[in-house]
Structure formats: structure tokens, C-alpha cells
């Protein structure tokens, strides 16, 4: 038995949107696909309990839209905690001490 997964997408303003994702507008609202389309075939998007709007309307009035970051998983947390920390700091990273040394060398040149 073979399972075929079809990716649901919609096109608005020449951009293709993956309808499985949550999209964030410029005001910070999160838009999700309701699973329905209007009479023209445009995907209906909804934020919270508001009235569904077409994807093209959301894009033109609140866009551009960016995909919401995926939630952090247990595996992500474990990978961060299991990664060893460096024992010594990176010598190429400037510190206040290296900046003070630079100022000291510059003062010596001006004298």
C-alpha cells in the first residue's frame, strides 16, 4: 500500500503559500488556513475567532506574510543541553581588554 501526500498550496500576488503552515503578518497576527476556499478558489485564512478572509486580502492588507517558526521540540532542547561548551573564549572576539590595548597603542602614536 502506497500513501501519497499532496502538499496544499495557494498563490496570492505571485507568491506560493504552503497552507499547512501558520503565517504571521506585519502586525504579528497568526493566520491559518480554515480548510476552505471561496467561490474563486482562493484559500480562506483566519486569525483567532475573526471572520475568515481570503489569502489575497490578508496579503494585500496585512502583508507581507512570513511563515511562523516551528515549535521547539524535546530533541531540539536536548541537542542544546548536550552540546559541550568551549573551555576557552574565541580569541578573535573583541573584548574590553583588547579595545583598551588598541587605545593604548594609538595614544603612543600621537605623542
Image (cartoon, rainbow, N blue to C red):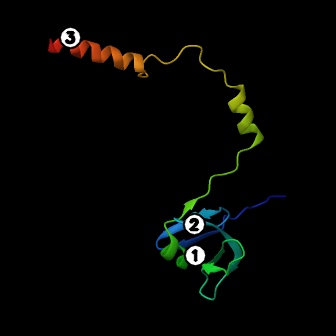
Tags 1 and 2 touching, CB below 8 Å: yes
Circle 3 residue: 108
Q: How far apart are marks 1 and 2 (CA)?
A: 9 Å
Seen from this angle, which residue lies furthest front?
Answer: 111
The C terminus - image quarter: top left
In the image, is 34 to the left or to the right of 111? right
Question: Secondary structure under badge 1?
Answer: helix
User: Residue 59: horizontal and vertical position, in percent?
Assistant: 52, 73
Location of residue 29 by image quarter: bottom right
User: Residue 9: horizontal and vertical position, in percent?
Assistant: 61, 68
Circle 2 residue: 17
Question: Secondary structure under badge 2?
Answer: strand
Residue that appears at 69% across and 65% down: 6
Q: Sequence order check: which comes first, mark 3 or mark 2?
A: 2
Front residue of this view, candidates 75 and 51: 51
Q: How crowded is mark 2: few (under 14 residues within 10 Å), some or many (20 or more)?
A: some
User: Residue 28: horizontal and vertical position, in percent?
Assistant: 58, 63
Front residue of this view, candidates 101 and 42: 101
Residue that appears at 53% across and 65% down: 65
Question: Secondary structure under badge 3?
Answer: helix
Seen from this angle, which residue lies furthest bottom?
Answer: 39
Q: Distance between the residues labelled 3 and 1?
A: 64 Å
Q: Distance between the residues labelled 3 and 2?
A: 60 Å
Q: Sequence order check: which comes first, mark 3 or mark 1?
A: 1
- The residue mark sitting in front, 1 or 2, is 1
The N terminus - image quarter: bottom right
Residue 47 tag number: none
Amino acid at each position: 500500500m502506497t500513501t501519497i501526500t499532496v502538499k496544499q498550496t495557494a498563490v496570492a500576488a505571485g507568491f506560493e503559500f504552503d497552507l499547512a503552515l501558520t503565517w504571521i503578518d506585519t502586525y504579528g497576527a497568526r493566520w491559518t488556513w480554515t480548510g476552505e476556499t471561496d467561490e474563486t478558489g482562493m484559500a480562506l485564512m483566519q486569525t483567532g475567532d475573526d471572520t475568515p478572509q481570503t489569502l489575497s486580502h490578508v496579503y494585500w492588507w496585512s502583508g507581507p506574510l512570513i511563515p511562523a517558526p516551528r515549535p521547539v521540540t524535546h530533541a531540539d532542547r536536548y541537542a542544546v543541553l548536550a552540546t559541550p561548551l568551549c573551555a576557552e573564549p574565541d580569541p578573535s572576539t573583541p573584548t574590553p581588554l583588547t579595545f583598551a590595548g588598541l587605545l593604548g597603542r594609538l595614544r603612543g602614536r600621537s605623542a
